[in-house]
Image (cartoon, helix red, strand yellow):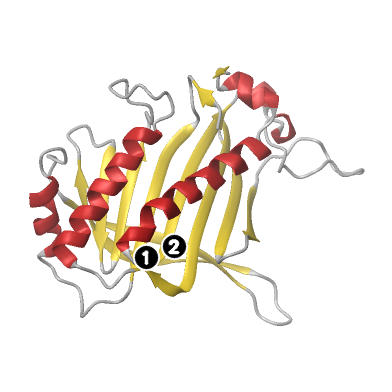
């Protein structure tokens, strides 16, 4: 994965879904906060997630659905840029922009992100002692900021819609979501959209199988998913995007 001085990452997320436990323990966020409070010193807060979906019925057009996702309690750092979310059988770790912390010298942000993932997962495992993980995801949400004069998606993303004879070149609005399947129960969700000052590229790689993974398998799985995200990112961006991110090879 290339190293960029100005990476377009606005949020990186690692999320675990655990095999169902006996029920939600309302004291769990407090117990985890006690384990992690050395860094997550901000005031914990409740957060209701939003889930998007598409409903397709025979003989009818597709309908977008928006619903409430699982409620989480968030543990936050003082600057609110690093977050841990805890919900019923769900643990998520978030890195908000700026993704690169100058205290870490690897130049990619992954060293810090990986360390926070392992710390949060180890604390969760110690406090909850779950049966195992049934779904793991690594997701990177990127924003490619461009001027109004440069609003041609094809210049920046290879996964942009191709030009079609008879249609205008300028796309005024855009939202797409495509799912791909790897071998071994791994899925890629690739989303892109147009915003006022650029484009959103959302890469989500998820491992989900019928078998429950124990703690010893998770680290290797996380690294594999993150590698796949990086490969996808490099596959879909153009050299114009790399210039924008100020790549250093």
Residue 49 visible in the shown view: no
**What residue does disc 1 label?**
69
Secondary element at tag 1? strand
Position of 95 with respect to 84 (left or right) is: right
The answer to the question of whether label 1 and label 2 lie on touching residues, with beta carbons closer than 8 A, is yes
Is 133 located above or below residue 105 in the figure?
below
| Residue 60, position as x, y percentages in the image | 70, 77
| Residue 201, position as x, y percentages in the image | 57, 41
| Marks 1 and 2, how far apart at CA | 5 Å
Position of 196 with respect to 29 (left or right) is: right
Is 132 located above or below residue 105 in the figure?
below
First of labels 1, 2 by sequence position: 2
> Would you call the spot at circle 2 few (<14 residues within 10 Å), some (14-19), or many (20 or more)?
few
| Residue 142, position as x, y percentages in the image | 51, 37
Residue 70 visible in the shown view: yes
Position of 133 with respect to 24 (left or right) is: right
Position of 158 with respect to 144 (left or right) is: right
């Amino acid at each position: 994965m290339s190293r960029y001085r100005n990476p377009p990452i606005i949020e990186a997320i690692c999320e675990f879904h655990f095999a169902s436990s006996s029920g939600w323990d309302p004291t769990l966020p407090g117990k985890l906060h006690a384990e992690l409070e050395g860094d997550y010193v901000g005031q914990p807060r409740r957060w209701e997630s939003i889930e998007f979906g598409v409903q397709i019925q025979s003989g009818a057009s597709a309908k977008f659905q928006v619903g409430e996702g699982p409620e989480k309690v968030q543990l936050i750092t003082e600057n609110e840029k690093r977050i841990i979310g805890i919900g019923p059988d769900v643990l998520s770790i978030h890195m908000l922009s700026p993704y690169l912390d100058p205290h870490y010298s690897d130049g990619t942000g992954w060293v810090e992100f990986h360390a926070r993932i392992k710390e949060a997962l180890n604390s969760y495992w110690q406090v909850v002692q779950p049966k195992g993980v049934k779904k793991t995801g690594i997701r990177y949400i990127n924003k490619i900021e461009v001027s109004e004069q440069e609003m041609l998606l094809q210049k920046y993303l290879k996964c942009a819609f191709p030009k079609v004879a008879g249609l205008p070149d300028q796309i005024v609005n855009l939202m797409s979501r495509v799912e791909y399947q790897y071998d071994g129960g791994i899925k890629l969700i690739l989303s892109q959209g147009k915003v006022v000052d650029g484009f959103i590229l959302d890469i989500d790689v998820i491992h989900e199988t019928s078998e429950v993974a124990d703690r010893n398998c998770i680290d290797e799985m996380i690294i594999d998913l993150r590698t796949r995200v990086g490969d996808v990112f490099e596959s879909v961006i153009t050299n114009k995007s790399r210039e924008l991110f100020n790549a250093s090879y």
